[in-house]
Image: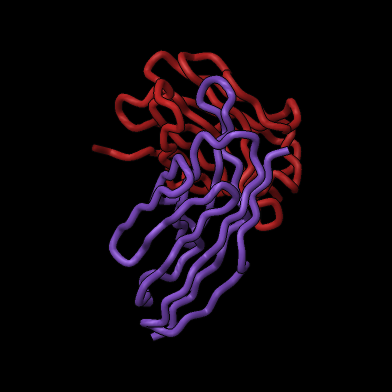
């Protein structure tokens, strides 16, 4: 069964204190790994898609990387507005537009 | 480009009732997926529709059903509501033709069952 595990469950950072969130996965052949940000009471907001080991993508203070077994979301010099739950999801190689399997998320709090 | 829209945004029902939720995908997106989000289980896949056909289905009881219309809009229905059906129901749309295509989520419908 495809599994996605995110760590830590919660992370509290001071403004400007860089850190990384982890997403480890077990899936037989990865079709895509997705990072989303979710604010309370809202739907997940798309951040990045990674397809193959070694791939990296950046957006403002966020950088996502991918290996064969895990992905990291690096947050550089975070600001309070980066506070949110960050979700990781994988898509397995079946036919059609297969469902995403999500991790439970990391709740990030950035304190000014 | 307008994003995914979901109606209603909030809903309160009592046990035993049924409910219908609606989702309008991003223009040009033909695949619509539904997810249930609860604090304990996180996001779990319900089903996916493409060209008015259910293409994938998650591990939920038959009380959960859906459909898609010719304009790609989708509805999901939950019959005989139970307390445990209280959740945020999320709809996501994507272009299904490409491998690993990104799914874009709507704001969700918050369902409370009393």
Q: Report how many numbered discs are placed on residues in the image.
A: 0
Q: Quarter-wise, where is residue B98 in the image?
A: top left
Q: Which chain is red?
A: B
Picture colour for chain A: purple
In the image, what residue occupies the spot 41% across and 44% down? A49
Residue B43 visible to the viewer: yes
Q: Residue furthest left?
A: B1
In the image, what residue occupies the spot 48% across and 19% down? B50
The quadrant of the rendering that contains the N terminus of chain A is top right
The quadrant of the rendering that contains the C terminus of chain A is bottom left
Looking at the picture, how far across and down is residue A93, in whole percent?
57, 28
In the image, what residue occupies the spot 75% across and 48% down? B83
Q: Quarter-wise, where is residue B25 in the image?
A: top left
Q: Is residue A6 above or below residue B49?
A: below
Residue A43 visible to the viewer: no
Q: Nearer the viewer, residue A56 or B111?
A: A56
Give the left or right position of residue A54, taking residue A59 as reference. right
In the image, what residue occupies the spot 32% across and 57% down? A58
Q: Nearer the viewer, residue B79 or B76?
A: B76
Give the left or right position of residue B29, taking residue B54 as reference. left
Looking at the picture, how far across and down is residue B76, in whole percent?
57, 29
Looking at the picture, how far across and down is residue A51, in whole percent?
45, 40
């Amino acid at each position: 069964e495809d599994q996605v595990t995110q760590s830590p469950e919660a992370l509290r950072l001071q403004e400007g204190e860089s850190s990384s969130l982890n997403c480890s996965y077990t899936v037989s052949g990865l079709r895509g790994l997705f990072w989303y940000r979710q604010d309370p009471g809202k739907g997940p907001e798309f951040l990045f898609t990674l397809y193959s080991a070694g791939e990296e993508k950046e957006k403002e203070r966020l950088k996502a990387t991918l290996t064969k077994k895990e992905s990291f979301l690096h947050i550089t010099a975070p600001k309070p507005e980066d506070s949110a739950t960050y979700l990781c999801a994988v898509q397995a190689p079946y036919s059609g537009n297969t469902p995403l399997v999500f991790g439970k998320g990391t709740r990030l709090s950035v304190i000014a | 480009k307008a994003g995914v829209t979901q109606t209603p945004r909030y809903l309160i029902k009592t046990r035993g009732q049924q409910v219908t939720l609606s989702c309008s995908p991003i223009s040009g997106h033909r695949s619509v997926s539904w997810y249930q989000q609860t604090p304990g289980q996180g996001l779990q896949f319900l089903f996916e529709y493409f060209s008015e056909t259910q293409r994938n289905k998650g591990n939920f009881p038959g009380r959960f059903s859906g459909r898609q219309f010719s304009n790609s809009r989708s509805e999901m229905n939950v019959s005989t509501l139970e307390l445990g059906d209280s959740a945020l129901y999320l709809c996501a749309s994507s272009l299904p033709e490409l491998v690993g295509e990104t799914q874009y989520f709507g704001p969700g419908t918050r369902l409370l069952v009393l």
